[in-house]
Image (cartoon, rainbow, N blue to C red):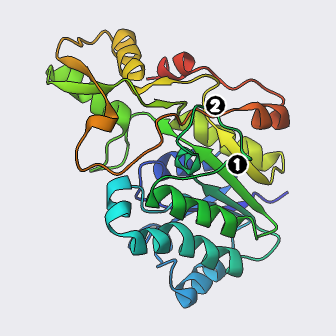
Amino acid sequence: MARPRILVSGASGLLGPYLIEAAKEWGDVFATSRTGGDFPADLLDQDETKNLIKKSDPDIFIHAAGLTDVDLCEKDPHSALDLNANVSKNLADLLSSGICFVSISTDQVYPDRPGPHAEDLEGPVNEYGRSKLTGEKAVLTHPGGLVFRTNFFGPSITPGRSSLSDFFIDNFQAKRKVTLFSDVFFSPLHMKTLCDLVFRSVSEGLRGIYNLGSRDGTSKAEFGLSMARHLGLSTEKAIMGKAQAQPDRAKRPADMRMDMTKLETALKMKMPTLEEEISKL
């Protein structure tokens, strides 16, 4: 049987290179971004997108491109809507029905209320979350639509980009003052685990919306401290703080922990704990 052709967008993003590496185990991989990859294309342009699909001829399209800067989305909602929603609509309209169309979404589609949140709940509090939720709905109009709400960490392999774990580790190693938010909760996965589970889900034929994260969750403060303990780094310059007290910052949900029951049931497995994910650093 021929190996499936896998096209990954967002090749120059933080997650893209991890997706490309994981995809090599499942099929023949091609990458796209606005100015790079195997098939450069502006996914807002219908003609360019049609040409991309024709040349790459994918069986699976992993859509990881988007505008992820929360504060920038708040300042420029038009660009947020274009890059996080209108691109998804364009792809959903142009990809043939037999293609598996996977979209990487966010835990910021959930409301500002205590978690863990199940997939049937939504209520974003910022332009980033609203634009991603609109994009999700567009993806799900496609017969092969599969959406993952997620959050992730791990060492960046993209030049010029750094992850949340990179930020903490760099500051701990340099013994710089760093504020740890004790009032923000989430349930992220290491990027390698995330990508492996994306392709396992595709191979199982999943469709619809799924939370994809660690089984439990914790505050971003405890996340940073746990990484420091694991890596033997000093936290002497770390101070506890509140995200809500930060000026000029777009509103974010305080608790983004996710309920993993739906995906665990579908894949017949238990998601890893956050401590298990941190141990992969």
Query: Would you place residue 231 above or below residue 70 in this image?
Result: above
Report the side of 243 relative to 88 (left or right). Answer: left
Q: Which residue occupies 84% across, 38% down?
A: 266
CA separation in Å, label 2 and label 1: 32 Å
| Amino acid marked by disc 1 | Trp
Height in image: 121 above or below 92? Answer: above
Please tell me whether mark 2 or mark 1 is closer to you in this view.
2
Residue on which the image places disc 1: 26
- Badge 2 crowding class, 10 Å Cα cut-off, few under 14, some 14 to 19, many 20 or more, is some
> Which residue is the site of mark 2?
116
Indicate the position of residue 21 as horizontal and vertical percent values.
54, 46
Image x and y of residue 11, in percent:
46, 59
Task: Answer yes or no: is residue 56 visible.
Answer: no
Relative to 116, is 26 above or below?
Answer: below
| Rendered-image quadrant of the N terminus | bottom right
Residue under the image location 14 percent in, 24 percent down = 176
In depth, the one of 123 and 89 nearer the eye is: 123
